[in-house]
Image (cartoon, rainbow, N blue to C red):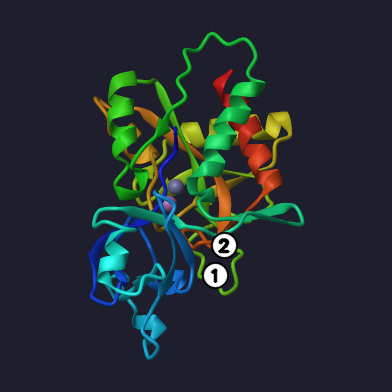
Amino acid sequence: SAHMDSIGLVATHIDEKGFVRVGALGGVGAKEVAYTPVRFQNGTCGLICVKGDADLDKVKVSDLFIDIGAANREEAEKLVQVGDALVYDTPVRQAAGRVISPYLDDRIACLVLLLAMGRLEETENDLYFVFSTQEEVGCRGAKTAAWAINPDYGIAVDVTGADDEPGSKHQASSLCGKGAAVKVMDRSVICPPELVERLMGLAAEKGIPAQRDVLQMGGTDAGPMQATRSGVYAGGISIPCRYTHTPTEMVDLGDVEACAQLTATFSM
Ligand code: CO
Ligand code: ZN
C-alpha cells in the first residue's frame, strides 16, 4: 500500500478584506508553510501569509491568511468557496542525485509501487497493489482495503523521517542515500521481527542497500493493516525523506530505486 493523498489546507472563512482563512487537512506545520505559494482545485492561486508582527514559533494554522489577490470579500467569493481545498504550488527540482518537491509523501511511494510492478517476474503469490486514500488524516483507506483483501502479509510503502537533517534529534533512524528503510516500528505499528529480518535478509542477498528504520513520530498504513480482522503480518519499506510535510521535501533517487527493488523482490 502507498497512499495517494497528501496533507493540505481547507478554506473555512473569507474575511471582509478578501483573505481566506484555513484549517489543516493532516499534519501541516504553520511555521513551515508561511509565504508558500498555493493553488486551489479550481486553479485559483494564492500565497500563505501571516500577520507582520507574528512570532513564527507560535503561529498556528488558524493564524494563517491566504492572499488570493482579491480586493475584498465579494471579489474573493467569486474565486473561492468555504470547503475548497488547497495545495502547495511549489516546483519540482533535481539537486544532484536528489529531488526536491512538495508531496513526495507519498507520491514517491506510488512511483515505487509502479516501478516494482514493472520489475515483477513470475510469482505464485496473489498480489494486490493498493493506492490508498486519507492516510494523512488517520490511515482510513488502508483500513478498508486491508479488510477487503484480508492479506497474509501487508507492506506499507511510505516516506520516513531522515536522521540527517540539520540538528536532527534522532527521532528517526534512517539516512538519506543509505538505501531502503525497513520498518522496525513507528507510532502506529511494531513489526514482527521475523518480517523485518526477512526483508533485511532479502536485501543483503540481492545486494540492495537497506537500513533498519525506527521512527518515533507518525504512523503509516502498516498500522491498520496489522490490526485488521484477526491480525496481519505487517511491515514497511520506506524512502528516507528530509523536511517531510514542508512544501519542499527531499528524497534520494538511489533510495527510491532500492525501495522498488526490495518491494519487487519481496513480492516474488
Ligand atoms: Co505524511
Ligand atoms: Zn506518508
Residue 249: image x %, image y %?
56, 58
Q: 134 or 207, which lies in front?
A: 134
Residue receiving disc 1: 168
Residue receiving disc 2: 163
User: In the image, is 30 to the left or to the right of 212?
Assistant: left
Q: Residues within 10 Å of mark 1 (few under 14, many from 20)?
A: few
> Which residue lies most toward the bottom here?
53
Quote the CA–CA distance across marks 2 and 1: 6 Å
Residue 268: image x %, image y %?
59, 17
> Cβ–Cβ below 8 Å for labels 2 and 1?
yes
Residue 232: image x %, image y %?
34, 27
Dot 1 amino acid type = Ser
- Labelled disc at residue 66: none
Q: 216 or 65, which lies in front?
A: 65
User: In the image, is 42 to the left or to the right of 60?
Assistant: right
Task: Quadrant for residue 181, please give it.
Answer: top right
